[in-house]
Image (cartoon, helix red, strand yellow):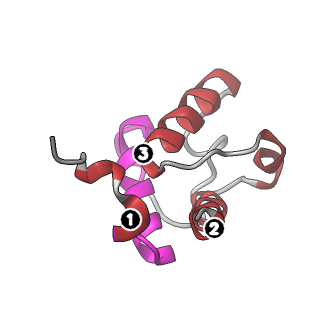
């Protein structure tokens, strides 16, 4: 059985721009019509993510990027760009 290509992020996705693009795709369903996702889109103010939705999103990101997101980084994440930087750091730190 061949590996799921969506799970092979570490070999396929190393640049910040690639992580950012993937986040746009993952977050698009959470955005109201007319909201354009950009680096400075605020996850709470612009997308209306509340605590339960953030936790669901973290689980989805962990599965998609094959990383573990520590809860203590979440207070530092306000925008999509912040989230992309955190995910990028986690990918780079994972052997």
Residue that appears at 15% across and 40% down: 1
Q: Earlier in the sequence, mark 1 or mark 2?
A: 1
Toward which corner of the image does residue 22 lie, by quadrant?
A: bottom left
Mark 2 or 3: the one toward you: 3
Q: Earlier in the sequence, mark 1 or mark 3?
A: 1
Dominant SS of magenta comes to helix
Q: Which mark is residue 85?
A: 2
The residue that disc 1 covers is 21
**Mark 1 and mark 3: span between their CA atoms?**
13 Å
Could you say whether the residue bearing mark 1 is in a helix, strand or loop? helix
The range drawn in magenta is: 12-35
Relative side of 3 to 21, left or right: left
Relative side of 32 to 76, left or right: left
Vertical placement of residue 71 versus 77, above or below: above
**Mark 1 and mark 2: span between their CA atoms?**
12 Å
Relative side of 61 to 35, left or right: right
Q: Residue furthest top?
A: 52
Residue that appears at 24% across and 46% down: 4
The residue that disc 3 covers is 64
């Amino acid at each position: 059985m061949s590996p799921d290509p969506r799970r092979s992020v570490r070999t396929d996705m190393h640049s910040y721009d690639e992580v950012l693009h993937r986040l746009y795709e993952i977050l698009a369903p959470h955005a109201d019509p007319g909201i354009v996702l950009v680096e400075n889109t605020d996850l709470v103010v612009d997308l209306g993510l509340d605590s339960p939705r953030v936790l669901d999103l973290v689980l989805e990101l962990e599965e998609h990027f094959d990383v573990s997101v520590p809860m203590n980084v979440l207070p530092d994440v306000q925008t999509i760009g912040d989230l992309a930087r955190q995910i990028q750091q986690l990918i780079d730190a994972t052997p």
